[in-house]
Image: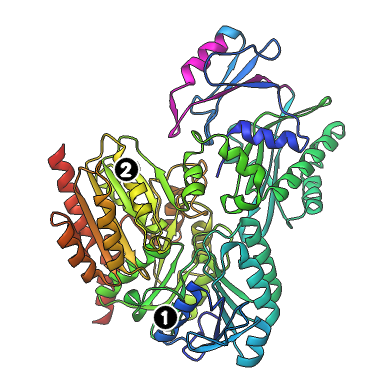
Amino acid sequence: MLLIEVDGKALFTEYGIQIPAGVVVTDAVPPLPGDGPWMVKAQVPAGGRGNAGGILRCDTRPEVEGAVAGMLGRRLKGHSIDACLVETAATGHERYLAIMVDPGSYGLRVIYSAQGGVEVEQSGSAQGRLCAPHPGAVTEALADLIAGEPAEWREQVAAIGKAMAKMLLDRELALAEINPLFVSRSGCVAGDAKVVIDLNAIDRQPRIASLIAARPAIYVDACRKIAEGFDYVELDPNGEIGLITTGAGLSMMLIDEMTARGARPLNFCDIRTGQMRGSPARLIRVLEWITSSGSLKAVLVNIFAGITDLAEFAGLLAAAIQASPALNVPVVARLVGRNAAEAQRILSETQPNMLVTQDLEEALARIDAIVRTAS
Amino acid sequence: MIGSLSRTTPVIVQGITGRMGRTHAALMRAYGTNIVGGTSARTDLKEAAGVPVFPSCAEAVLETGAVASVAMAPPGETRAAVMEALTAGIKLIVTVAEGIPLHDAIKIGRAVRRAGATWVGGSTPGLAIPGECKLGFLPDVCLKPGPIGIMSKSGTLSYEVGYRLAREGLGQSIWVGVGGDPVKGVRFADMLPVFFNDPRTKGIVLVGEVGGAEEEECAEAYARMGTRKPLYALIAGREAKEGVSMGHAGALVHGEFGTLESKTRQLTQAGAKVFGSIESLIERCARHYRFDKR
């Protein structure tokens, strides 16, 4: 999961990597560091902010105020902008430096480019080296990559690389990237920070856990996953179809197919029926989130039960629906797998109006019809 | 190793006295897998799911001659389980845990490679040779012997595909859940030679997801190896939200990297056929292989 820039930079400073002086702005612009120029940067967990208008250079305070006012509250790359970072514009030659986990080699990939800037990842000018996941190996790989750089700052870049490697391994990161890295004789400064963390290591990474817990409004999905133990991602705040589904891949495919036929799914969900242990609590939570959307028109339940007893699940679903008075749209359930016929019988007794089917295409057609009628 | 698995391959279950271990050991046995024992830290239990329980992999292997293991360990304990299995001489290990820490997976991968073993997982329901054996918990309702080799990042989406193919009368030769983690054991490209060399396999279904570069790697390998059998692909996540893991840690899109467009383009260029919906994939397979039969 991608951290927002200020959190990535917080980690950087803990490992001795220099960053420009800056302030986080969520409302009125406070006194600014230095005399300008400044960079105003939208703090959303997404790449490509520069090209999307989320990074602006400003020469005066009124320009900064205008840029901040123009960004806050807007949506950028699917995320709402709740905070901006305003920092002094760094100077020097722009470089690109990244260290990332390389899945194919069970090692790390170190990338360095003598050109920084927004296009470097696409341009192919970046050179990469694979190495073992050890700080010494990263140092060696990077020494190779920067061999052509002027001697006066080569050592400083090497030191940054060493710090990044230590950070990546200590904090169990997937990626640490600086683009641009400003290099000059007086020192190296990280102009940006792209840090991808591993949510699966959060239990043993208290520092990362604290960064996420401190910003529940920005890391909504991660906070929810940590608190609830399953995945729920809001996709479209004006979505019409709430999804209670299991399995990451099938849930994603369902969303793709529904979107392709013009439907508007509200959320992604991998509810993990195997972890419910006889309690409808998880289903009630999801119904609570789904029904809080004013645009909801239908709920689709899709469970392919390899192991889960669908008869038990049907009982839990019926209980959850009864415990959710806010649910006032039709529910369609597609249940296939172990004990599907018994599940169908249970739901037909308690929820006579619910379509319960084993056929996904039939369920999707019914959802289409419900949405059409409601519109 | 995967291609030669059969009902006689001796398999142990690590963590066999736990809730998951006990249940799935029994289900695997019922399917026909030659489960010869299990391991557990509990010394009071001598038997679980009808097979002997050993205190360590080393003893289990010594007593039973097991060559494969299914590790039913929580994500944080999977690395230790794999190390124990490798030390005991296990040659194929399936890790079903969802949520293995990334840097643990790197260490597992390096150890498996050093040992010359095969690793399937994590975040996988496992693998099966339908009609012979299954290692993990692929649902029986989807399994049917037949000509299609399935490899999948996603459990549930592959269940859906396998189930609907089976309903059309098309079963599977080898089914491997490579799993939804970015750092994993067997990858899509590794499976191509297995399918190419397996006489039962007539066509290959790849069930992919956005994120990572496995589909692209597979496309490159497929073209390089000479597209010896048809490759049909279904890739989930067109609508995935950027920067957020969609359930699977590996299903993470950053910018242009790992997108559906990139995967579709490269697979198509390599000679594979990429489908936009489950139904269209099923239809195409059904048409092709029914025609084959005549």
Q: Is residue A293 visible?
A: yes
Query: Residue sitting at 83 percent across and 36 percent down?
Result: A154
Give left or right: position of A99 versus B155. right
Please, what is the three-letter code of the amino acid marked with disc 2? Answer: Ile
Q: State the extent of the magenta-drawn residues as a range.
A: A63-91
**Residue depicted at 71% across the width and 72% down the height:** B114
Q: Which residue is mark 1?
A: B27
Q: Position of residue B7 (x, y in %)?
A: 46, 89
Eyeballing the image, is B14 above or below A47? Answer: below
For label 2, the SS is helix
Q: Position of residue B184 (x, y in %)?
A: 57, 63
- Is residue B187 shown in magenta? no
Measure the alpha-carbon separation of dots 1 and 2.
36 Å
Q: Verify whether residue A72 appears in magenta.
A: yes
Chain name for mark 2: A
Checking the image for residue A290, the label placed there is: 2
Whether residue B132 appears in this view of the structure is no
> What kind of element bears circle 1?
helix
> Is the Cβ of the residue at disc 1 closer than 8 Å to that at disc 2?
no
